[in-house]
Image: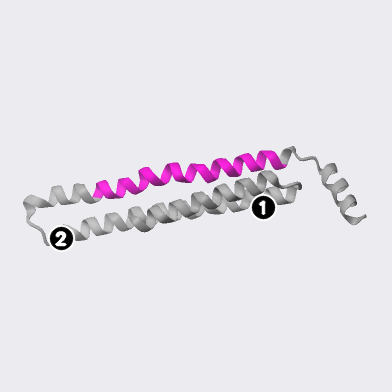
Amino acid sequence: MTVFVVATVVIETLAIVFLIRGLRATSRAACMRGVGHCAALAFGELVAVGAGKVSALVVSFAGVAGVDPAMKAEMLSRGIDAAETFESIGVPAILLPVAFAALLFARARRTPPAAEAAQRQQVRR
């Protein structure tokens, strides 16, 4: 669980960094790179949530294999609760990079291509 929380914090921090870089970008291409980075971070978080949930369920079911039948239900419910905790933390964490990517995508679409061409002309001079 600790590794999952640390990974989530790192992913969310990177998403904020890419949001700031995308908002400060002066070209459509630079803004679209931020969209790609945020989308990749959301996918990484999705994989982390899935892996955490599956591993918690595997540990839960493996843990009740050699236990007294009277205790199986309680131990299994604890394990399933841990798996659901991964999901309850992970789903909102996935939404943040997705929202950032959508915001940057909308900003990139607002940037007129003519502004990029004018900016390239100024750089060449």
Residue plotted at (47% across, 46% down): 94
Q: Which residue corresponds to mark 1?
A: 33
Q: Secondary structure at mark 2?
A: loop
Q: Is residue 75 left or right of residue 19?
A: left
Residue 119 lies left or right of residue 19; in this view the side is right
Element under disc 1: helix
Residue 111 at x, y = what percent? 76, 40
**Closest to the observer, 26 or 109:** 26
Give the left or right position of residue 116, taking residue 109 as reference.
right
Place of residue 97 in the rendered image (x, y in percent of width and height, measured from the top left):
53, 46
Give the Cα separation between the discs numbered 2 and 1.
Answer: 48 Å
**37 or 12, nearer to the observer:** 12
- Label 1: how many residues lie within 10 Å, few (<14), some (14-19) or many (20+)? some
* Quarter of the figure with residue 6: bottom left
Question: Label 2 amino acid?
Answer: Ala
Instruction: Residue 79 in the image: state x and y as whole percent.
Output: 23, 51
Label annotation for residue 15 = none
What secondary structure is the stretch in magenta mostly built from?
helix
Region of the chain picked out in magenta, as a range: 80-108
Density class for disc 2 (Cα within 10 Å; few <14, some 14-19, many ≥20) is few
Residue 65 numbered tag: 2
Where 51 falls versus 86 (above or below)?
below
Left-right relation of 86 to 94: left
Q: Position of residue 116 (x, y in %)?
A: 82, 46
Quadrant where the C terminus lies?
bottom right
Q: Indicate the amino acid at tag 1.
A: Arg
Query: Which residue is located at x 7 percent, y 53 percent?
Result: 69
